[in-house]
């Protein structure tokens, strides 16, 4: 029994290395904007660049978030790259080659008390992608990625949520091997003072197989612990 435990321990070490390999492979073609640096990390106005705007970074809801105001521009903020060595370009190029295997996600947060009486009667959110060859597509169908009613906008309760979807599930079909990629955020509404706070804006592979490997490791670890208890 002691020999079995030793072999299992050796297997666990090998499996852990494999899991780390899968996770590192995934993160190499991922991009996340968490704004913990206190800067907007390169986000700018629609169809523009970082220098076009410095978005405020606000600590709110327990996290640093980018503040995006509804100005009536519809496409309110985006980030882009034509630098093939950048993390953003690599992630978007990988997603363009495998829309079903890539997920776009973010957290959003809205506090109606920050602009009472100025939030309007509706507020909706969405996402868009644009490339160098002129491709443009947006996720702004039904249902919206998030949608606030007049009652919510006139209330006092914070409203927040998490959005996550694979690109293919929303009909995105980015041209592969393009020389330029852009991702952006949509806000639509009728309130002059409405502001939404975004965090953890991420483009990454669907969480497989790494998550499955780690899940399996959890089961093996429990088995190993049981063996340890039996063998003393």
Image (tube, helix red, strand yellow):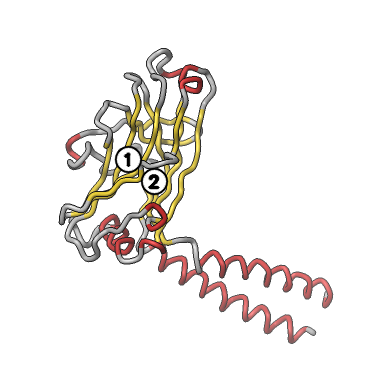
In the rendered image, residue 55, in percent from the top left (x then y), is placed at 29, 33
The C terminus, quarter of image: bottom right
The N terminus, quarter of image: bottom right
Q: Identify the image quadrant of residue 9.
A: bottom right
Residue that badge 2 annotates: 201
Residue that badge 1 annotates: 185
Judge from the rendering whether residue 28 lies leftward or rightward of residue 54; answer left or right.
Answer: right
159 and 214: which is toward the camera:
159
Residue lying furthest bottom in this view? 3
Task: Give the Cα distance between marks 2 and 1.
Answer: 10 Å
At a point 56% along the width and 72% down the height, the residue shown is 16
Badge 2: how crowded within 10 Å, few (<14), some, or many (20+)?
A: many
Residue lying furthest front in this view? 142
At a point 74% along the width and 86% down the height, the residue shown is 3
Q: Secondary structure at mark 2?
A: strand
Residue lying furthest top in this view? 117
In the rendered image, residue 21, in percent from the top left (x then y), is placed at 46, 72
> Of label 2 and label 1, which has the lower sequence position?
1
Q: Identify the image quadrant of residue 145.
A: top left
- Kindly check if marks 2 and 1 are in contact, taking CB atoms under 8 A apart as contact: yes
Judge from the rendering whether residue 169 lies leftward or rightward of residue 62; answer left or right.
Answer: left
Whether 24 is drawn above or below 163: the answer is below
Q: Any mark on residue 223, and which? A: none
140 and 104: which is toward the camera:
140
């Amino acid at each position: 029994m002691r020999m079995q435990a030793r072999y299992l321990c050796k297997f666990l070490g090998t499996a852990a290395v494999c899991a780390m390999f899968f996770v590192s492979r995934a993160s190499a073609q991922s991009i996340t904007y968490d704004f913990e640096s206190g800067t907007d990390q390169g986000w700018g106005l629609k169809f523009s660049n970082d220098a076009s705007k410095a978005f405020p970074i606000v600590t709110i809801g327990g996290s640093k978030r980018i503040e995006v105001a509804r100005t009536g521009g519809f496409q309110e903020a985006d980030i882009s790259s034509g630098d093939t060595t950048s993390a953003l370009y690599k992630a978007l190029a990988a997603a363009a080659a495998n829309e079903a295997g890539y997920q776009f996600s973010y957290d959003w947060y809205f506090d109606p008390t920050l602009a009472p009486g100025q939030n309007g009667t509706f507020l909706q959110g969405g996402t868009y992608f644009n490339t160098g060859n002129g491709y443009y597509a947006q996720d702004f169908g039904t249902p919206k990625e998030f949608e606030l009613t007049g009652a919510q906008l006139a209330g006092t309760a914070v409203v927040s949520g998490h959005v996550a979807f694979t690109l293919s599930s929303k009909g995105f079909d980015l041209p592969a091997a393009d020389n330029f990629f852009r991702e952006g955020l949509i806000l639509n509404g009728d309130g002059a003072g409405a502001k939404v706070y975004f965090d953890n804006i991420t483009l990454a592979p669907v969480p497989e197989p790494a998550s499955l490997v780690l899940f399996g490791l959890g089961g093996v670890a429990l088995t190993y612990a049981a063996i340890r208890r039996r063998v003393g």
